[in-house]
Image (spheres, grey):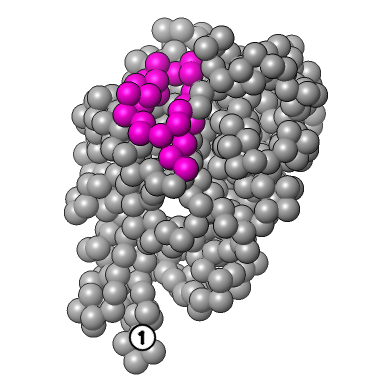
Amino acid sequence: MTALAVYCKERGIAVTGSDVPEDFPTKQILAHAGIIPLEGFSVDHIDTQVRPDLVIYTGAHQGRDNIEVKKAVAAGIPTLPHGKALGMIMEDSVQISVAGSHGKTTTSAMIATILVEAGKDPSYAIGCGTIFPIGAPGHFGKGNEFVAEADEYVTDPGHDMTPRFLWQQPDILVVTNIDFDHPDAYENLKGVEDAFAKFSDKEKGMRMTIINADDPNSRSLQTYAKGEVFTYGVSRSADLQILDIQYGEGSTMFHLSLRGTPVGEPMTLVIPGKHNVYNACAAISACHALGISWKHIQKGLSQFKGTKRRFEHLGTIHGMDFYDDYAHHPHEIEATLEGVRGWYPRRRVIAVFQPHTYSRTKALLLQFGKSFTHASVVCIADIYASARETETFGMTSKRVVEEIVKYKKDVWYVKDERGSQQFLEKHGRPLDIIIFMGAGDIYDWGKKIVKNL
């Protein structure tokens, strides 16, 4: 919602809004844009004397059942769910929609960064805090391109189960991977795959589908795509083949081949992990399809320093390096920790993880058990319950600990922020890498603990 709000403000639209009183990573972005949300939700926030032209709502806070949305409807003020509003705003642009179960935020941000470096001035709406180095996650540009995350979650839980990305009509559809997630919305992997197949049918204009050739679940889209399909990966069958990945402390380098022809100089990233090499190749493929030169692509990638909450460095205290990361699915956790281990093979890695939602924890419990193999020490906090979830399904963090301990010996239950700090005060050592992981309120723990230490 922050990215869309900033985009609208830059476009010259007066923007107001409401939010819960918690601090979020996007708070500073809104404040810098001159948007200060009203605290809490109240019917008084919808002024029928000075009527807003449109009320856009998110499913995170009761969706259309939110009291402000209900008042707007009663007063005859148009209302739209966020996904539908974003699709409407993108309509007149060359749409680059980045979908996938994992990596869509980073890939979208990479594409935006490369286009900015190439002087294209794209519009974009990306679900994160700051994009380093281009700034806010939303922008109204003068160019024809609009880069947006394309989220497979539902439009309005309990009301409109349409996958949010189906409101977009991409000219270029990037699919980073397809995995089972959102068990409150999809019964199984087949349900997720079907949603992506429907999305590929929404393409317009260029009708370019970019697929990870090494992801078996994504390859099924080749059957459904009505336009050109372009693939990337280490597979020899990939149109853009990844060659010779090399890791150094603080950098990742790789070479590329385009349909058998080497692509100039190597590409360099200052973010870790093989998964980010894949994200970069998805971004490279999209920008190449848009006619961006290899020189601009290479320079844009080298300038990209990640996004807020994606292996974000919080500080170095007593010789320990602290990071924050949004990873909350087992495959994301595994990929992030593998990337950290690739950069720092000799340092101890302590992962502090807060499971997100009881339904996800139950559905993916066995996978969570195996996802921390690249960590030296694992600390598990209590499960963060989503506002849309009331059933615990019998899940507790102690069950998560019991599953992980089958594969790792050094696993601890730390309960909360205070417990995490106490653990680190007692067991932390110089040169340790501490990474806070999760999609709940753990985003605030790291910086507080760094300050306290």
Work out whether residue 424 can be spotted.
Answer: no
> Is 46 on the left-hand or right-hand side of 277?
left
Q: How many marks?
A: 1
Q: Residue at x 29, y 74 (%)?
A: 78
Residue at (74, 26) in percent of width and height: 267
How far across and down, in percent of the image, does residue 202 sit? 33, 44
Q: Residue at x 58, y 24 (%)?
A: 278
Q: Quick one: label 1, few (<14), some, or many (20+) residues within 10 Å? A: few
At x 68% / y 53%, what residue is drawn?
A: 120
**Bounds of the magenta span?**
206-229
Secondary structure of the residue carrying tag 1 is loop
Q: Quadrant of the N terminus?
A: bottom left
User: Does the image show residue 135?
Assistant: yes
Above-or-below relation of 49 to 1: below
From the top left corner, tell me how far across and down residue 245 is, in percent.
70, 15
Q: Position of residue 374 (x, y in %)?
A: 58, 14
As drawn, is 184 to the left or to the right of 276? left
